[in-house]
Image: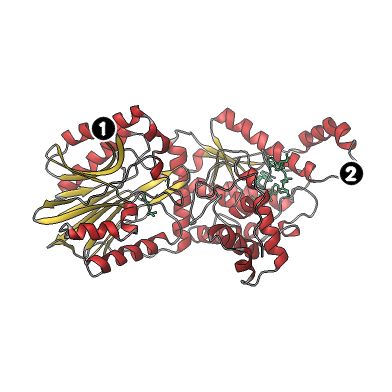
Amino acid sequence: MKLAIAQINCTVGDLGGNARKILDYANRAKQSGAKLVITPELALSGYPPEDLLLREGFREACGKAMANLAARINGVALLIGHPHLADNKLHNAASLIRDGKIIATYFKNELPNDFVFDERRYFAPGAHPCVFDLEGIKFSINICADIWQKRTAACAKEAGADIILVLNASPYHMRKQALRYEVIRERINETGLSFVYANMTGAQDELVFDGASFAMNHKGELTHQFDEFKETLGLIELQNGIPIRGKMPTSRPLEASIYSALCLGVKDYVGKNGIPGVLLGLSGGVDSALTLAIAVDALGADKVRAVMMPSRFTADISLSDARAMARAMGVHYCEIPIDTVFEEYRQTLAHELLALPQHGRADVTEENLQARIRGNLLMALSNRYGSIVLTTGNKSEMAVGYCTLYGDMAGGFAVLKDIKKTMVYQLCHHRNTLGSIIPERVINRAPSAELRPDQTDQDSLPPYEVLDSIIEAYMEHDLSLSEILSMDYAEADVRRVVHLVRLSEHKRRQSPIGPRITQRGFGKDWRYPITARYLDEF
Ligand SMILES: Nc1ncnc2c1ncn2[C@@H]1O[C@H](COP(=O)(O)OP(=O)(O)OC[C@H]2O[C@@H]([n+]3cccc(C(=O)O)c3)[C@H](O)[C@@H]2O)[C@@H](O)[C@H]1O
Ligand SMILES: Nc1ncnc2c1ncn2[C@@H]1O[C@H](COP(=O)(O)OP(=O)(O)OP(=O)(O)O)[C@@H](O)[C@H]1O
Ligand SMILES: NC(=O)CC[C@H](N)C(=O)O
């Protein structure tokens, strides 16, 4: 028997579009000889529909879309993920459709409320396994978080299943696939059953779904591994209910996966929101260089504008590197000097600024003015072109507040929000292996905001290797200060970084969203209070 995984990119709320895509994949599966096609979790509504689920109209529309779709399915069975209202309770459900009828429905048992998930806000849990017979094989259904616990797979086994089909909306983060293999192998060890893992691809706001659907046999051997970050119809041959070896993985470096995740994040945010293009400030520095490369790879050069806005502090090499990159990437490029506007601002504010005791001495006020002039100019171009501004700040900067409110933080989508500075460099090197578009000098220069003479980032921050490790330990792994200190960092560095992370919470609340690629980003899975007096002790 042959079955198919519809590894599709759904759009949240596009019930008609998602249903058409599912029908198309079902028909293609049928033509390929498959008897059953499996969609990802909540494929009909897209994932996560969030508070749309609280609207009665949306829930009713989901029910109607299911009925319409069911009527059009024939010649192949479809196992589809969808929101389902029963007895006044909303469930995260999966239904089997055959010959125009819904013949079985399963309700997700384990509703995740951790990390980026809020499913208990919307859904009631199911409590029963669901096993159906097709071509003499007993299939059981699990939905995503179900298989991260022992219970539902064990119940499926008890109910007589030969194989477990898992519908997923499992977002990407670095090394997530290894974690998924590990979890499924644990379930296989406990149950002795084979598994088919169907995951969604595509991006939804800050979440990126990598697809990477796969199958494993009852011995825990990988039998199929489908592509990551791409829609695909994955065909799986079963013999006596066990998958037999088919498409195998092609190995890719970590940086390649992350780069693809960022491109898909940008492409789907821009595409699914109907935005005509993007623009960004190109400084000759490494962050805007990488952001530009990602935008071009995601959208095509014709949808991308780069704007160099030199000031008196801009080095000649910044200007020439910006020009070289814009040329190499083939994007629209313009230069708008900011010195005149900056001088006007200073004159306009002179009376007030000079009234202060430290009068005459330029400080962060002037630095931020420059960043805000640039932000303002970019927003003007954004309004005129209808394009969104991509911000270029990376995770290290977002962590310690090394960014200016309404300045370089002004924009619609923060591409590198979850990319620490050390990874920015790795991604630049990776991108250059595919064609050299970021000049080596841009990668090798000491990073500087160029907001005052001879400024470099390391003037006020520990070296990025140290900063990033402390951020990773404190923010991504939730380690205590003493645990971080035992990793051999200087106490002053640890204290300073943690202090800055706390102090800049208010900035992050005003920052645009950006694609999540680590197991903890500064988005849905970081919910610290701004107003708080708790201090970790050593
Ligand atoms: N809890 C709170 N709730 C709400 N607002 C709060 C606040 N605490 C301070 N504020 C306000 O926030 C504002 C201060 O923030 P902001 O104006 O952004 O400025 P601020 O954080 O003081 O300075 C910007 C920092 O970012 C660095 N920077 C800027 C630009 C680019 C780069 C780079 O290399 O990429 C680095 C720059 O060197 C400087 O250290 C003030 O108006 C302050 O009153
Ligand atoms: N001269 C400039 N022209 C255009 N945009 C600029 C310029 N200077 C700064 N920006 C914008 O502000 C962002 C923050 O720049 P800044 O140089 O302060 O810090 P950075 O984090 O080192 O970034 P980068 O590595 O891109 O220079 C830049 O990425 C860019 O988008
Ligand atoms: N949608 C879900 O239930 C996802 C849960 C699971 N922890 C995952 O990330 O794969």
**From mark 2 to mark 1, how far is it between C-alphas?**
66 Å
What is the number of the mark on residue 358?
A: 2
Classed neighbour count for the residue bearing mark 2: other residues with Cα under 10 Å, few (<14), some (14–19), many (≥20): few
- Is there any visible trace of residue 1 in the rendered image? no
Percent from the top left, x then y, of residue 351? 88, 32
Image position of 341 (left or right of 328): right
Is 29 or 488 nearer to us in this picture? 488
Marks 2, 1: nearer the viewer: 1
- Is there any visible trace of residue 361 in the rendered image? yes
Is 327 or 465 nearer to us in this picture? 465
Determine the residue positioned at 58% across, 55% down. 438
Here the colouring is: secondary structure
Number of marks present in the image shown: 2
Question: Which mark sits nearer the N-terminus, 2 or 1?
Answer: 1
Image position of 323 (left or right of 368): left
- The quarter of the image that holds ligand 1 is top right
Percent from the top left, x then y, of residue 259? 48, 55
State which quarter of the image contains the N terminus. bottom left
Where, by quadrant of the figure, is residue 149 drawn? bottom left
Residue beneath disc 1: 63
Where, by quadrant of the figure, is residue 499 drawn? bottom right
The secondary structure type at the circle numbered 2 is loop
Determine the residue positioned at 86% across, 36% down. 353
Determine the residue positioned at 37% across, 35% down. 53
The secondary structure type at the circle numbered 1 is helix
Determine the residue positioned at 43% across, 62% down. 175
- For badge 2, the amino acid type reads Gln
- For badge 1, the amino acid type reads Gly
State which quarter of the image contains the C terminus. bottom right
